[in-house]
Image: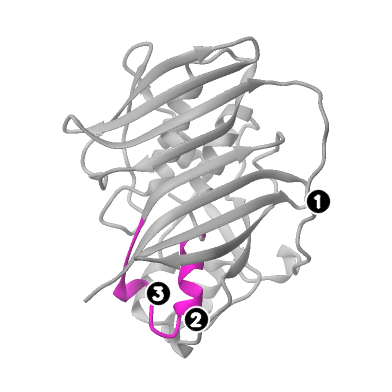
Amino acid sequence: MNHISELVDLIELKRINDNIFSGKSEPIGSANVFGGQVLAQALYAMAQTVPEDRLCNSYHSYFILPGDLRQEILYEVQHIRDGGSFSVRRVTALQNNKVIFFMGASFHAFEQGYDHQIQAPEVPHHSELFSWDDMYSELKDFMPKEVREFLSIQRPITFKPTLIFNPAERKKIEPFQNVWFKIKGETENNSVMNRSLMSYISDYNILSTALHPHADVAHFGNTNMATLDHSMWFFRDFNINDWFLFNIDSPSASEARGFTRGNIFTADGTLIASVTQEGLIRPLT
């Protein structure tokens, strides 16, 4: 995938009946289904079953089994409650009649209320930075194999980290990261699809931040990494065609698990969403 239209097509599931949807998968370099894809498709399935005036304000999810890229994924939606201003749904993702993932989500009709937010961090502007594509084009001959293979994959999103670390140096790094991102091409500014697209993107960059303090010994090639759970909160509406800043930190890693969290800001500093994720970061022996 190298254009946002391909990702939108992937997220727009086939509807089997009122509450069951079917989705396909696209590889992004892993032998298993990308977690962000399942997040996006699951949220999309639930959103098709709620009143049109209600958008997702939060969800919480767990990854149970690795997804098989060769098989379709069935998403079964349960209606938990429809209240005066909130709806709650639960979705289960299945392959071979086995649950590989589940998510619970809340959907809220717009209301006026109090409004405040934290400030976005001060970082270099995205126009001053190299993207992953730029780094691959200019430095691929000097990169470790695992980094070169990762950056060579075509993606429908442009990522621009504010700091570039040399993986060959094997130095410990503080558990923080800021990454600008933007979709490649343009798509309809649809609030329902926007939340699914942002969910897909939110699974990039976040777990790797938990490896930063261990970069002297740990890297993608010698660490088994997998998302265990992922939660997201949407605070304000946004235009998915804009630039965004993902501000990430990792407060803790222990017992082969890394905990990470992030805030997503628009280019003008508006906080639109927050994310938390715990993932497996098991050293390979």
The residue mark sitting in front, 2 or 1, is: 1
Q: What is the C-alpha distance between the residues marked 3 and 1? A: 33 Å
Whether residue 156 appears in this view of the structure is no
N-term mark: 3 or 1: 3
At x 42%, y 84%, the residue is 141
Question: Please, is residue 268 above or below residue 152 in the view?
Answer: above
Using residue 165 as the reference point, say whether residue 273 is left or right of it.
Answer: right
Q: What SS does tag 3 mark?
A: helix
Q: What residue type is labelled 3?
A: Arg
Kindly identify which residue carries mark 2.
Answer: 139
Mark identifier at residue 268:
1
Kindly give the residue lying farthest to the left in the view shown: 96
Q: Give 17 or 247, whichever is nearer the viewer.
A: 247
Q: Is residue 224 magenta?
A: yes
Kindly identify which residue carries mark 3.
Answer: 148
Whether residue 277 appears in this view of the structure is yes
Q: Which amino acid does label 2 sit on?
A: Leu
Stretch in magenta? 206-226
Mark identifier at residue 252:
none
Image quarter of the C terminus: bottom left
Say which quarter of the image contains residue 70. Answer: top left
Q: What SS does tag 1 mark?
A: loop
Measuring from the top left, give residue 274's x and y in whole percent.
Answer: 62, 46
Measuring from the top left, give residue 152's x and y in whole percent.
Answer: 41, 67
Q: Give 255 or 198, whichever is nearer the viewer.
A: 255
Using residue 96 as the reference point, say whether residue 78 is left or right of it.
Answer: right
At x 82%, y 36%, the residue is 115
